C-alpha cells in the first residue's frame, strides 16, 4: 500500500529569486516530485509568499483578516500554476480550494480527494483553511489529518529542528528525532502553535527538512529520513 504524504512547500520555492514564479524553479520541483509520485500518494500545500506576505505589506494599513484573504488567493494562484505546469508533463493533478471558486478548481471535500488519489493524481490543497488568522502551516496540518496522511513533511530553508536558531548560534544542536513533549517543554520553533497542536493531538508525525537542497524533497517523498522527525 502506498504511503500518503502531505508536503508543505513555501511559495518562494516556485521562483529562483523568491518572487512570483519562474520555469527553472518549477522544473526543479517537478523533477523531485515526478518519480516519487509513482510510489506515494502526494498532497501538496503551497504557501503564497512569492506573491503576498502580510507582514511585508503592513505599511498599507490593511486589516489582518483582509491581508490573509489576499494571501489565500496567492496560494490558489500557486496551486493552479504548478498543477498546470505538471499536467504539461502528463503528471495528473487535482486542485482543491478551501473556498468555493468553481470556475477555477473544486471545493475541498474528502470524497473527491479520495477519488483523485485513486486516479494517481497529485492533490493540491489551496486557499488555506478558508479562514483568516491561520497560516498555511495550520492548513497543512488540517489537510494532513483529514486525508489521513502518514506524514506531514515540511520543507523549510533549515535542515531540521535545533535546540536554538542555527542562523544565530553556530553551536546549536540538531535533533534527528524529538518528541512533541520535548518541543513543547523547550519551546522549539517547529511551526506555528495551532498547527503544532493539531499534529500533537492527532499523533501526526512531522518531518522538517531543508527543501532548498536538491534531492531532499524526492528523498522524503520516497520515505527516506531527512532532517528531523517530530513524533
Image (tube, grey):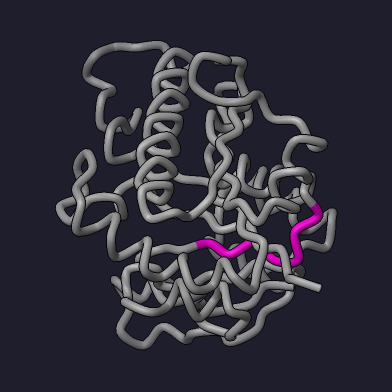
Instruction: Identify the image quadrant of residue 50.
Output: top left
Instruction: Give the extent of the magenta segment.
Output: 148-154
* Residue 77, above or below 113: above
Looking at this view, name the residue that lies furthest to the left: 17
Q: Residue at x 36, y 48 (%)?
A: 88
Q: Residue at x 65, y 84 (%)?
A: 177
- Horizontal and vertical percent for residue 10? 39, 51
Residue 151 in magenta stretch: yes
Residue 90 relative to residue 139: left or right: left
- Horizontal and vertical percent for residue 95? 56, 36
Q: Quadrant of the N terminus?
A: bottom right
- Looking at this view, is 111 or 75 the one in front? 111
Q: How many marks?
A: 0
* Residue 215, above or below 96: below
- Looking at this view, is 69 or 77 the one in front? 77
Residue 101 in magenta stretch: no
* Residue 176, above or below 208: below
Q: Quadrant of the C terminus?
A: bottom right
Looking at this view, name the residue that lies furthest to the front: 90
Q: Residue at x 28, y 33 (%)?
A: 51
Q: Residue at x 67, y 43 (%)?
A: 194
- Horizontal and vertical percent for residue 30? 37, 61
- Horizontal and vertical percent for residue 97? 59, 28
- Looking at this view, is 141 or 173 the one in front? 141
Residue 176 relative to residue 77: left or right: right
Amino acid at each position: 500500500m502506498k504511503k500518503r504524504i502531505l508536503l508543505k512547500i513555501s511559495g518562494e520555492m516556485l521562483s529562483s529569486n523568491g518572487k512570483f514564479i519562474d520555469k527553472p524553479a518549477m522544473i526543479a520541483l517537478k523533477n523531485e516530485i515526478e518519480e516519487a509520485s509513482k510510489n506515494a500518494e502526494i498532497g501538496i500545500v503551497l504557501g503564497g509568499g512569492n506573491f503576498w506576505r502580510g507582514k511585508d505589506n503592513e505599511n498599507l494599513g490593511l486589516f489582518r483578516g483582509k491581508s490573509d484573504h489576499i494571501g489565500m488567493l496567492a496560494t490558489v494562484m500557486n496551486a493552479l500554476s504548478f498543477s498546470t505546469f505538471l499536467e504539461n508533463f502528463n503528471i495528473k493533478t487535482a486542485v482543491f480550494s478551501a473556498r468555493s471558486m468553481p470556475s477555477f478548481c473544486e471545493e475541498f471535500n474528502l470524497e473527491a480527494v479520495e477519488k483523485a488519489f485513486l486516479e494517481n493524481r497529485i492533490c493540491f490543497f489551496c486557499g488555506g483553511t478558508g479562514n483568516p488568522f491561520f497560516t498555511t502551516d495550520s492548513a497543512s496540518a488540517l489537510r494532513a489529518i483529514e486525508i489521513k496522511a502518514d506524514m506531514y513533511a515540511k520543507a523549510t530553508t533549515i535542515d531540521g529542528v535545533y535546540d536554538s536558531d542555527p542562523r544565530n548560534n553556530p553551536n546549536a544542536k540538531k535533533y534527528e528525532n524529538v518528541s512533541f513533549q520535548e518541543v513543547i517543554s523547550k519551546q522549539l520553533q517547529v511551526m506555528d502553535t495551532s498547527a503544532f497542536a493539531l499534529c500533537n493531538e492527532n499523533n501526526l508525525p512531522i518531518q522538517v527538512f531543508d527543501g532548498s537542497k536538491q534531492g531532499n524533497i524526492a528523498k522524503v517523498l520516497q520515505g527516506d529520513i531527512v532532517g528531523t522527525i517530530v513524533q
